[in-house]
Amino acid sequence: MNYDAAIKFLYDLQLFGSKLGLENTLQLAALAGNPHRRLRFIHVAGTNGKGSTCAMLESIYRAAGLRVGLFTSPHLVAFGERIQVNRRPIGEADVARLAAEMQALPGQFAADAHPTFFEVVTMMALRYFAEQECDLVIWETGLGGRLDATNIVTPLASVITNIQFDHQQWLGDTLERIASEKAGIIKPGVPVITAVDNPEAFRILFETARKQDAPFRLITWAQTENHPMRGLQLSLLGEHQRLNAAVAAHTVMALADEIPVSHETIRAGLSRVEWPGRLQLVERAPGRKLLLDGAHNIGSAGMLRTALHTYFETRELTFILGILRDKDWLPMCEILAPLAARILLVPVSSRRSATPEELLPACRAANPAATVEACDSLAEALHRAQNDSFVVVTGSLYLVGEAMELLNLAPASPRNERDLNEWGAALARV
């Protein structure tokens, strides 16, 4: 199997949608020799900030000299972003080899229990990290936690960044229900580190940890100015990233007996972490700036609003906005539209995209003074905004990935591998 055939194999798995449940992944793991049992993990869940927190943990432990695996989703441009060792994406030859090995396994499942894209990719990652003899794997959940395919591992620590509204159609329509799903990654005796600030969500996490006899640490804004965070200049923009950094730092400190890391190393790792597409500032030409931010739900839209007020003093913002229809797009428009003088609405490259025509009345109602235009594509919007002084591309990580390709900020994929992110469009519970 070559790389093109491997990508086609992964595309074809989209036919099986996605299922919340561990049975398939456990069976795949057994067939693959249970590679997760040869690895150590930090398991990270949460509504927002889990990817950034994963990147921070990876950077700290790599600065400490460890060989670190990183498993995250979705990818912005290329599939290999999901599976990295010491921040080097898995190579095409390894993707092809692992896909070929996995291709033979689904035949051992019942027809109505065919492994899904995410289950197969999870197992590919585990096999790769075991082959690479990673000292530690930073392991991000795909959706929720309790029934997510990543939850077959017993980690060194369970991290839950925060609990906010997202994926309500699958995880529940209250913060308590969402918290119950994410609390499912808590394991007996395994430390829990969280920055959750909702009282009901906190209660559920705390009670789950108590029942599991799991040490519990709540990280608050006070810890963002305590050692080793005091005076630290983060490489990532956004005040919310200081809280994510505190979560990462206290996770490392909670594991100090098992993996000793100095405060100086924690600071070094946090000071040089990279995580594209999150408040990523690009200088397009003298006097012209572009900000890429994958704000894709109500909470992250609010964080973007705060960041714009904090870091950028400008009244002439142009927003290029595209949102998936299964997100809370109306309140997102209400948060973001008032920030802009000009709004260019675009479709996201996804069958789940809200149309510009759907977003247009919401944006006009939220900001009657703005110029609001519908565009047929992101490329058209970027062209229309090419002379604007400050452009913000936001509303979806998928949109940010497309922008990175169009702006030559990442190598373009001839296969449009961004479409692999569509694996979760048809979700079923098992």
Image (cartoon, grey):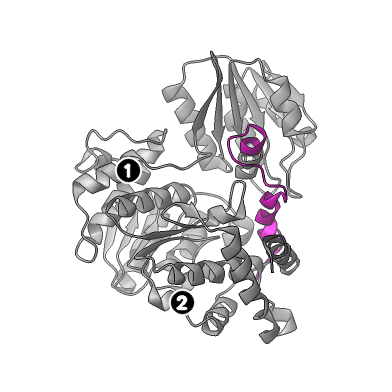
Residue 228 is left or right of residue 110, and the answer is: left
The stretch of residues the image draws in magenta is: 403-430
Whichever of labels 1 and 2 marks the residue nearer the N terminus, that label is 2
Residue at point 49% right, 51% down? Answer: 47
Where 386 sits versus 102, above or below? Answer: above
* x and y, in percent, of residue 193 in the image: 32, 57
Q: Which quadrant holds residue 137?
A: bottom left
Does the stretch in magenta take in 66? no
Local crowd size for mark 2, using a 10 Å CA cut-off: few (<14), some (14–19), many (≥20): some
* x and y, in percent, of residue 13 in the image: 71, 67
Where 87 sits versus 243, above or below? Answer: below
Q: What residue sits right under mark 2 in the picture?
A: 35
Q: In which quarter of the image is the C terminus?
A: bottom right
The three-letter code of the residue at mark 2 reads Pro
Where 132 sits versus 348, above or below? Answer: below
Q: Nearer the viewer, residue 235 or 152?
A: 235
Q: Nearer the viewer, residue 351 or 309?
A: 351
Residue at point 53% right, 58% down? Answer: 90
Judged from the image, the secondary structure of the residue bearing numbered disc 2 is helix
* x and y, in percent, of residue 129 in the image: 45, 67
Does the stretch in magenta take in 428? yes
Q: Nearer the viewer, residue 116 or 200?
A: 116
Judged from the image, the secondary structure of the residue bearing numbered disc 1 is helix
Residue at point 38% right, 53% down? Answer: 58
Cα distance between the residues tagged 1 and 2 = 30 Å
Q: What residue sits right under mark 1 in the picture?
A: 270
Where 243 sits versus 363, above or below? Answer: below
